Image (cartoon, helix red, strand yellow):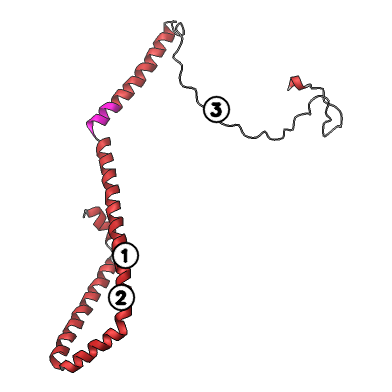
């Protein structure tokens, strides 16, 4: 794992909690070691059966949840790594000599076209040859007309005066 990821994931209190949990595990193991030395087989068997009775269902449910979390986390981590790799590949491409030289060519072509157009205008020869037609953008649907506050067409009464307007349909 890289340092930026590790440094973002570091949480001092989380590490301290892990240390405390591990210290508790050590104490539990020490207690178990003493119990195993100081108990009979019948006591060990009774304790084991009691544990299974009290905890078996809970353990099975927790196991199922952990299996699902395991699948989800592994899948998501793999997807995130793949996304990061694509981003790294894209960044590497952008930093490549090919992209740099292509960008330089594009800028040079744009400047050349502008320079030639200016030259032709300055020389008075621009416009003698028909231009190449560029693709015409497709018209967008126009919005519904909104009621206007213009006078009514000829022959209709205006809202304010009740008189007919002087405009004909052809004037609109």
Q: Give the quarter of the image for residue 154.
A: top right
Query: Which residue is more in the foreground, 31 or 11?
Result: 31
Helix, strand or loop at mark 3: loop
* Magenta-drawn stretch, dominant element (helix, strand or loop): helix
127 on left or right of 116: right
3D distance between C-alphas at marks 1 and 2: 14 Å
Image point (83%, 28%), residue name: 156
The numbered dot on residue 54 is none
Q: Find residue 89 and report its horizontal and vertical position in percent.
A: 25, 41
Image point (22%, 73%), residue name: 19
Q: Residues within 10 Å of mark 1 (few under 14, many from 20)?
A: few
138 on left or right of 77: right
Helix, strand or loop at mark 1: helix
Q: Is residue 128 magenta?
A: no
Query: Which residue is more in the foreground, 142 or 29?
Result: 142
Q: Nearer the N terminus, badge 2 or badge 3? A: 2
Helix, strand or loop at mark 2: helix
Relative to 27, say whether 163 is above or below: above
Q: Which residue is mark 2?
A: 60
Q: Give the quarter of the image for residue 160.
A: top right
**Which span of residues is magenta-colored?**
96-102
Q: Nearer the N terminus, badge 1 or badge 2? A: 2
Relative to 17, say whether 162 is above or below: above
Q: Which residue is mark 1?
A: 69
Relative to 115, say whether 25 is above or below: below
Q: Residues within 10 Å of mark 2 (few under 14, many from 20)?
A: few
Query: Which residue is more in the foreground, 85 or 8?
Result: 85
Q: Residues within 10 Å of mark 3 (few under 14, many from 20)?
A: few
Query: Which residue is more in the foreground, 17 or 58?
Result: 58
Q: Which residue is mark 3?
A: 139
3D distance between C-alphas at marks 1 and 3: 52 Å
3D distance between C-alphas at marks 2 and 3: 64 Å
């Amino acid at each position: 794992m890289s340092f930026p990821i590790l440094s973002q994931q570091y949480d001092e209190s989380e590490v301290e909690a892990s240390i405390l949990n591990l210290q508790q595990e050590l104490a539990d193991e020490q207690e178990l070691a003493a119990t195993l030395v100081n108990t009979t087989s019948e006591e060990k068997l009774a304790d084991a059966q009691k544990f299974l009775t009290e905890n078996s269902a809970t353990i099975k449910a927790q196991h199922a949840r952990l299996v699902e979390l395991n699948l989800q986390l592994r899948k998501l981590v793999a997807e995130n790594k793949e996304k990061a790799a694509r981003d790294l590949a894209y960044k590497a491409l952008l930093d490549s000599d090919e992209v740099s030289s292509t960008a330089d060519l594009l800028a040079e072509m744009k400047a050349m076209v502008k320079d030639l157009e200016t030259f032709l205008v300055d020389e008075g020869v621009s416009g003698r040859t028909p231009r190449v037609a560029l693709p015409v953008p497709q018209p967008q649907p126009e919005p519904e007309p909104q009621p206007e506050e213009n006078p009514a067409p000829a022959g209709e009464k205006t809202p304010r005066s009740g008189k007919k307007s002087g405009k004909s349909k052809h004037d609109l």
